[in-house]
Amino acid sequence: MHRHVRHLIELQSVDVRLGELRAALAAFPKRLAEVERRLEAARTQLSTAKTVLTNSLKDRKKYELDVEQWKEKARKYKDQLYEVKTNEAYKALQHEIQLAEAEIAKAEDRLLEQMVAGEDYERQVKGSGKALAEVESVAQAERQKLVAEQAAAEQELAALTATREQAMASVPEELFDLYQRIARKHGGVALAEVRDETCTMCRVRVRPHVFQELRNAACQEILHCESCTRILYLAEEAVAKTSEQ
């Protein structure tokens, strides 16, 4: 194996992990926003439930007032029955009393419906309040977890960045430029291990003479996959076993 390929393998391992860390760090704002979205949805649900309950209580008072107003009208008409002097007036008052009592019944039905609905709205408020408390508890735990994960990722990122600088210092500039060009072309992976005489990245079989060179512990040539152009290497254990044979 070329002596600098060992450094490239280390560099690629660091770069892959750095890519994962940067992706994770970039995702933290979205993950935090999702926590806040769920929290805001629970708050909105409670606020909506409270608004519906408040409006229900207002309607209930209105229906109670309707009942009392129609009852008052019925009482007045009944009181007037003792004052009328003709049968026509008496019948007219009885008709008004019947109409008032019919309206009383309607108003009482509306009031009863509103009271039943109000009880349901009260349950919804209690349920939404309980759900919000649970969401707040979970959100607090998730925030703490995300903050801890973010801090750990940033710490690891800083440490690996320093490690990368050391690995880069061991690689000639021209070879490092080649590594970067190939990595940019293949999603950050510039090197490919060979297993069973096959490139593990593109699954194309390498030529026999290339494989023989890879098995040669003294080989100092940079070998590429003819299919994907990645830099090929054979695991140290495989090279060691070949040397012993």
Image: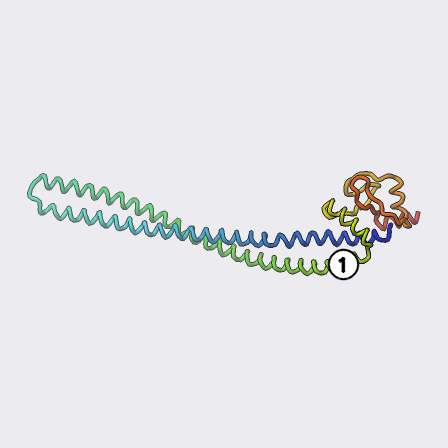
Q: Is residue 151 left or right of residue 80?
A: right
| Classed neighbour count for the residue bearing mark 1: other residues with Cα under 10 Å, few (<14), some (14–19), many (≥20) | few
Please give the name of the residue rendered at 86% of the width and 39% of the height, measured from the top-left corner: 207
Q: Is residue 95 left or right of residue 229?
A: left
Q: Position of residue 180 (x, y in %)?
A: 76, 49
SS class, disc 1: helix
Q: Is residue 94 above or below residue 56?
A: above
Q: Position of residue 211 (x, y in %)?
A: 87, 42
Q: Position of residue 168 (x, y in %)?
A: 78, 56
Q: Is residue 118 above or below residue 150?
A: above
What amino acid is at disc 1?
A: Glu
Q: Which residue is mark 1?
A: 165
Please give the name of the residue rendered at 58% of the width and 52% of the height, measured from the top-left corner: 30
- Front-most of 109 and 240? 240
Q: Residue furthest front?
A: 174
- Front-most of 116 and 189? 189
Q: Residue furthest left?
A: 85
